[in-house]
Image: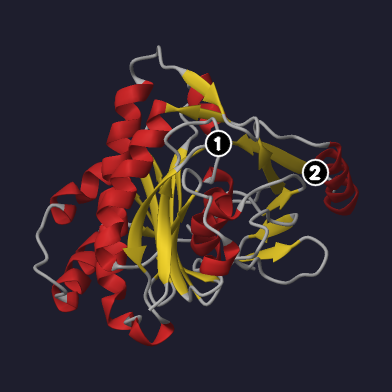
Amino acid sequence: MPECYLGFVQEVTGRSYFIRTISISERNFSHMNDSIYLLESLRVALKAGDAILDVYRTADFEVEVKADKSPLTLADRRSHKIIADRLTKFDIPILSEEGREIPYGERKRWNSYWLIDPLDGTKEFIKQNGEFTVNIALIVARKPKSGVVFAPDKGILYFAQDNLGAYKVDSAAILKFLEQEVVGSNHERASEIIGDITNRSVKLPIPDTAEKPYTIIGSRSHATPELEAFVEEKRREYGEVDFMSAGSSLKLCLVAEGRADIYPRTGPTMEWDTAAGQAIVEFSGGRVLKYDSEEPLDYNKENLLNPWFVARKVE
């Protein structure tokens, strides 16, 4: 089997250290383990969120600047290590924002892999407005199969899977289920626990019979002239239009909830920024489409930069 690399950016000077692991082939990917993968994604997202909050609450953390000018904190690193250490047991490759330096020659062989952003919304984290998330997605055949988005400061957890739907839950309400042990690859027991969790969660979209204006959601930290033009166009089309701002993957999750009708992204994002949130939107019945072609975003491209896109709630 081909070898792949799990990367962890130890420094921001260009040097990286890699942990070797073994990739799996398409024929070895077992859909019987879907519940196990989702359950572990939920568990590790909460553990990573706890580590992020430990740093967040010190209110005096160091901020470094990566080569691409984006900020990096101790919270990013700690979250990455927790997620990577826990998910490597599945022998599924991992691509992370903090471990991105994996050659495309290796990546293009992957049919299945974890795509994670250990701390989405680092700028929101630094501003201390609470609008940052942990994003974990499982990609199969270049499409999100499952996604978990956890907002640790808010205690809000979103999760979705292609055969399950999309849900929102207060993380404190499901801790006792996440602590239950699953021995080995007991997918039946994992399915029972996922069932207990969904029974205490709200299925997305959340029904709302109240009349409200057409609602657009956009980035709190990355507004563009193109976004302003989009909003003006919708005002001409719909008359009254509301505009919401939010950070990180919460924008996609609010579309999945139905609180926002549309999220146009007319600025740069990377694949790890969107994969988990795209799963939440799509498995709630919504769509995440490329801005010009109306095709779904796909993953594991040679260039990990996303095109502009539009996310729409279920119609």
How far across and how far down the image is residue 41, in percent?
32, 57
Seen at 63% across and 68% down, the residue is 298
Say which quarter of the image contains residue 209.
bottom right
How far across and how far down the image is residue 103, in percent?
56, 60
Badge 2, how many Cα within 10 Å: few under 14, some, many 20+?
few
Q: Specify the color scheme.
A: secondary structure
> Is 108 placed above or below 152 here?
below
Badge 1, how many Cα within 10 Å: few under 14, some, many 20+?
few
Residue 14: image tag? 1
> Is 156 placed above or below 12 here?
below
How far across and how far down the image is residue 46, in percent?
29, 44
| Residue to which mark 2 is pinned | 240
Task: Report helix, strand or loop for mark 1.
Answer: loop
Identity, as a three-letter code, of the amino acid under mark 1:
Gly
Identity, as a three-letter code, of the amino acid under mark 2:
Glu
Q: Quadrant of the N terminus?
A: bottom left
How far across and how far down the image is residue 218, in percent?
68, 41
Say which quarter of the image contains residue 81.
top left
